Amino acid sequence: MKSASKANFKQNYKTHLKHLKLKGLQPSTIDAYARAIRRIGAHFDYRLDDLSEAQLTDYFSDLLDSRSWSVVKHDLYGLKFYYTHVL
């Protein structure tokens, strides 16, 4: 099951990159959003399709304790873009 989740994540990640480029975002924004999705994917064992509000709240709360506000914002906006344009 784990490999199926990772394969699905890889396909969705490629779609995410395509949508970022098609939106005409700056390369630095594309890099930040892509990095965010990889980080969140690794944290949740590459299962982003059905995360609960509680899981996301815990993730971002923990992230605030260990990373800068800028990283938190990029992860939030990157995930929002992913959910809006990929899922």
Image: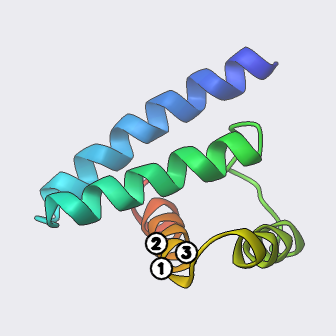
| Residue 8 placement: quadrant | top right
Residue with the mark numbered 2: 74
For marks 1 and 3 on the same chain, the one whose residue lies earlier in the sequence: 1
Picture coordinates of residue 22 (x, y %)? 14, 56
Q: Residues within 10 Å of mark 1 (few under 14, many from 20)?
A: few
Asked if the residue under mark 2 is in contact with the one under mark 3, i.e. CB atoms within 8 Å, the reply is yes
Mark 1 vs mark 3: give the one in front: 1
| Residue 33 placement: quadrant | bottom left
The residue shown at (48%, 79%) is 70
Amino acid type of disc 3?
Answer: Leu
Secondary element at tag 2: helix
Residue positioned most to the bottom: 69
Asked if the residue under mark 2 is in contact with the one under mark 1, i.e. CB atoms within 8 Å, the reply is yes
State how far apart marks 1 and 2 are (Cα): 6 Å
- In this view, the residue in front, 40 or 14, is 40
State how far apart marks 3 and 2 are (Cα): 5 Å
Residue with the mark numbered 1: 70
Residue with the mark numbered 3: 76
| Residue 87 visible in this rendered orientation of the protein | no
The residue shown at (76%, 37%) is 45
| Residue 73 visible in this rendered orientation of the protein | yes
Relative to 32, is 60 on the left or the right? right
Picture coordinates of residue 32 (x, y %)? 37, 60
Q: Residues within 10 Å of mark 2 (few under 14, many from 20)?
A: some
Q: Residues within 10 Å of mark 3 (few under 14, many from 20)?
A: some
